[in-house]
Image: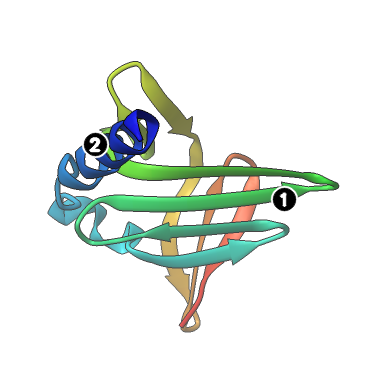
Amino acid sequence: MRRMLMIGCMAMLLAGCGQPLPPDKADYAGTWQGNGVMLQIAADGRVDYQRVEGSRTRSVSGPIKAFQGDSFSVGIGALSTLFEVSSKPSESQGTWRMTVDGVQLTRVP
């Protein structure tokens, strides 16, 4: 019972700590996919990420904590993950792409 209460409190903290994407980062919003990676970035700053490599799956969910140049960190306090963006979102011939942690992602229409 106590464990469920702690999990519920953490979920509410994570849900309530996000800040909307800054206007200059609005192009980050959307669902992105590529080579075993699914990344959802909501306009309200919430991120859901999943990466499958072989039999391993890595998942991260939480609010964007901060942008560092084009890259961003997700989480609260010391519990955060940095997503290295080497190619920020850009559109070419109607298709949006960006590169995160070395994987080229395409925005799902």
Residue 99: x %, y % from top left: 55, 50
82 or 98, which is in the foreground?
82
Asked if residue 96 lies left or right of residue 23, the reply is right
How dense is the environment of label 2, judged by Cα within 10 Å: few (below 14), some, or many (20 and up)? Answer: few
Q: Residue at x 15, y 49 (%)?
A: 22
Separation of disc 1 and disc 2 at Cα? 28 Å
Secondary structure, mark 2, is helix
Asked if residue 98 lies left or right of residue 45, the reply is right
Query: Which one is in front in this view, the residue at disc 1 or the one at disc 2?
Result: 2
Check the image and name the residue furthest to the top.
78
Residue denoted by label 1: 52
Q: How many marks?
A: 2
28 or 79, which is in the foreground?
79
Secondary structure, mark 1, is strand
Which three-letter amino acid code belongs to the residue tagged 2?
Cys
Cβ atoms under marks 1 and 2 closer than 8 Å = no
15 or 35, which is in the foreground?
15
Residue 61: x %, y % from top left: 42, 45
Which three-letter amino acid code belongs to the residue tagged 1?
Val
Q: Residue at x 29, y 52 (%)?
A: 46
Mark seen at residue 28: none
Please report whichever mark, 1 or 2, sits nearer to the chain's N-terminal start. Answer: 2
Asked if residue 34 lies left or right of residue 54, the reply is left
Quarter-wise, where is residue 74 in the image? top left
Coloring scheme of the render? rainbow
Q: Quadrant of the N terminus?
A: top left
Q: Is residue 78 above or below residue 92?
A: above
Q: Is residue 40 above or below residue 46?
A: below
93 or 96, which is in the foreground?
96
Residue denoted by label 2: 9
Residue 60: x %, y % from top left: 49, 42
Quarter-wise, where is residue 14 in the image? top left
